[in-house]
């Protein structure tokens, strides 16, 4: 089920509840979601990638609330995870150890997720020349997959990253994501 389908179903649920209240139909036990929670749920599902947005917000909050910890602790962890995923996917010896395509898909999603988190947390982002993430290599790994299986991940990089459209992002990386 995609976000628009969830949003449509949830809107239908809210309209139905509203009509039931207008017609004085009693609620069925604890099946009703209160308005405050319903509003928060609607805002959550309105995001293109709701869980990634939540993770990004939580990571950013963690970094800002823990100023005593160097930001490099967080960004080094994220860049290492992206590099591990990239190497596992691009090296035939390691890739052959995956017994099913779901593992490959999971590894691709983790790689893209940590790139987006890194881009939101690091001051200059994942696309800068000084980034510890090999963005060209990661994009190449994504482009080497069947297009229908990675289009959503490429779109996540295109539309949910913070620094892709910065002037400092190389034209080559921008063109790879066109």
Image (spheres, rainbow, N blue to C red):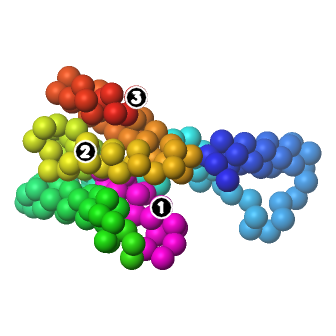
Q: Nearer the viewer, residue 76 or 151?
A: 151
> Crowding at label 2, few (<14), some or many (≥20) Cα neighbours within 10 Å?
many
Closer to the chain start, of discs 1 and 2, is 1
Distance from label 2 to label 3 (Cα)?
Answer: 14 Å
Q: Are marks 2 and 3 in contact (CB under 8 Å)?
A: no
Instruction: Say whether residue 99 is magenta.
Output: yes
Residue nearest the viewer, comparing 176 with 43: 176
Mark 3 touching mark 1, by CB under 8 A?
Answer: no
* Residue 54 x, y percent position in the rendering: 42, 53
Q: Sequence order check: which comes first, mark 3 or mark 1?
A: 1
Q: Dot 3 lies on which element? A: loop
Residue at the spot x=51%, y=66% of the render? Answer: 101
Earlier residue among tags 2 and 3:
2
Q: Is residue 175 visible?
A: yes
Element on which disc 2 rests: helix
Q: Is residue 140 left or right of residue 127?
A: right
| Residue at point 56%, 46% (across, down) | 148
Dominant secondary-structure state across the stretch colored magenta: helix
Circle number at residue 178: 3
Quarter of the image with the C terminus in it: top left
Q: Residue at x 21, y 48 (%)?
A: 134
Residue designated by label 1: 105
Span shown in magenta: 98-117
Q: Label 2: which residue?
A: 135
């Amino acid at each position: 089920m995609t976000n628009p389908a969830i949003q449509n179903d949830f809107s239908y649920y809210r309209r139905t509840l509203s009509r039931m209240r207008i017609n004085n139909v009693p609620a069925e036990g604890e099946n009703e979601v209160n308005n405050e929670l319903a509003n928060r749920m609607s805002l959550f599902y309105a995001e293109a990638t709701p869980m990634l947005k939540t993770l990004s917000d939580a990571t950013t909050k963690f970094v800002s609330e823990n100023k005593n910890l160097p930001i490099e602790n967080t960004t080094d962890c994220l860049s290492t995870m992206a590099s591990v995923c990239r190497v596992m996917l691009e090296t035939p010896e390691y890739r052959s150890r995956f017994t099913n395509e779901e593992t490959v898909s999971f590894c691709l999603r983790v790689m893209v997720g940590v790139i987006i988190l890194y881009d939101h947390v690091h001051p200059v982002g994942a696309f800068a020349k000084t980034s510890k993430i090999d963005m060209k290599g990661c994009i190449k790994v994504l482009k080497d997959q069947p297009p229908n299986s990675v289009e959503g991940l490429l779109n996540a990089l295109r539309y949910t990253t913070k620094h892709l459209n910065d002037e400092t992002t190389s034209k080559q990386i921008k063109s790879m994501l066109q």
